[in-house]
Image (cartoon, rainbow, N blue to C red):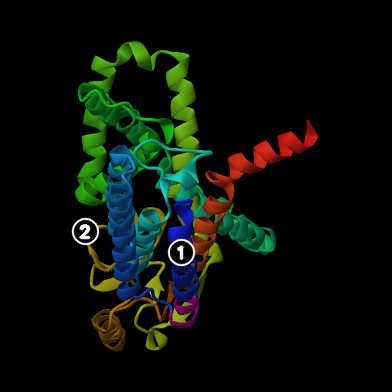
Amino acid sequence: MQIIYIFLPFILFLGLLTSYEDIKKGKIRNKWIVVALIYALLAYVAIIAFSLIKGMAINYTYFLEVSVNVVIALAVGFAGWWTNLWSSGDAKLFLAYSALVPLTMYSNFYVQYFPSFVLLINTFIPFFFYATVKILFTSLRVKKELFKEIKLKEIYPIAINLIWVMWLPRLIFSALNISLGFFLNFVIIFTLMITLRKLFKKGFFVISLALCALRLIFDYSYITTMQFVQETGLFLVVFVGIIYFIPKLGSKLFVSQVKIGDLKPRMILAESIYKKGAKYERATTAAKMKAEGKAIIASSAEGLTIADIKKIQKLHKEKKLSFNEIMVQQTMPFAPFMFGGALLTLLAKGNVLSFLVKFIYTALY
């Protein structure tokens, strides 16, 4: 019997249940994540026990790869939550799917050490499709406002960061004699960049310049090659899209103005509130980055707490706020997209885009 039949019933159960609860209640309960992880663990223990009883050879390398994949999925999920890219519930659900989807389901597109990166790609494909459709039907006024807010001075720091971030992980892993594929290298670079940016805040740019200088000294021969230009250009397009354009797009397409008195727990602010003189202002994107460290209420993937709301409403009552409304992100249940990503992974046995390209090519030729 193929290993997928052991995990498929629970994948369907978890997907349907968490999607329903996320749509209806706006949350993913921890107990389902715990049950999923226990199920995955017991399933693999049962597979090993059955193999021992039957005298079958056990592929210990496979189970080692499963363990490494789950550990990396945990780290990526934590980094995504810590940097406010997604909620803790979404991060935990990704961990659960990473444990439940067998490695054989990545046979058409296997990313060494972290095959669940394919699951991540397949999760965001339906999400980006939805966002694209929404963009097409967005008013021309909103599109114009979006392009007016695009500033080159907000993009060039990303390019500066890439110069050293693309070098340091490769240098470290080469010293450890570990070979990284393109996609795992992408995950490490992205996680390192957003983590250090949040950790050091204002000092991050100074650190970036210092590390860039080190690369210019020790890696000058590679920087002057065309391969460096092509590689950096590719990553720059991807990172500018993820770090800059997608958040900016979301600030226009997936937000609504809410009166201070109507704020509710778990609402996700699209703006941060920070002190400016005797008053308190609100800020997004570049202004928000400058306000880091001074924000009294920051945008968080976990949403507002009761204490946050009381604090905001108290400031409003005391007339210390310079605004009566604040932008709130329109909550979108992410569990259905992740369930869709898991199903696409099972159907395509890898990256669904790669599968479609091969399918079309075979059909035509």
* Magenta region includes residue 50: no
Q: Position of residue 157 (x, y in %)?
A: 36, 38
Image point (46%, 51%), residue name: 119
Q: Is residue 290 visible?
A: no
Q: Is residue 144 visible?
A: yes
- Determine the secondary structure under disc 1: helix
The residue labelled by disc 1 is 11
Q: Earlier in the sequence, mark 1 or mark 2?
A: 1
The residue labelled by disc 2 is 293
Residue at the extreme top: 221
Tell which of 67 and 118 is nearer to you: 67
Tell which of 193 and 96 is nearer to you: 96
Amino acid type at circle 2 is Gly
> In terms of secondary structure, what is the magenta stretch mainly?
helix
> Residue 271 occupies which quadrant of the picture?
bottom left
Q: Position of residue 46 (x, y in %)?
A: 31, 58
Q: Which residues are magenta?
A: 20-25
Against 260, residue 179 (above or below) is above
Against 311, residue 156 (above or below) is above
Image point (46%, 38%), residue name: 110
Residue at the extreme right: 364
Q: Is residue 360 left or right of residue 163?
A: right
Amino acid type at circle 1 is Ile
Q: Is residue 365 left or right of residue 16?
A: right
The crowd level at tag 2 (other Cα within 10 Å; few <14, some 14-19, many 20+) is few
Q: Position of residue 100 (x, y in %)?
A: 39, 57
* Magenta region includes residue 24: yes
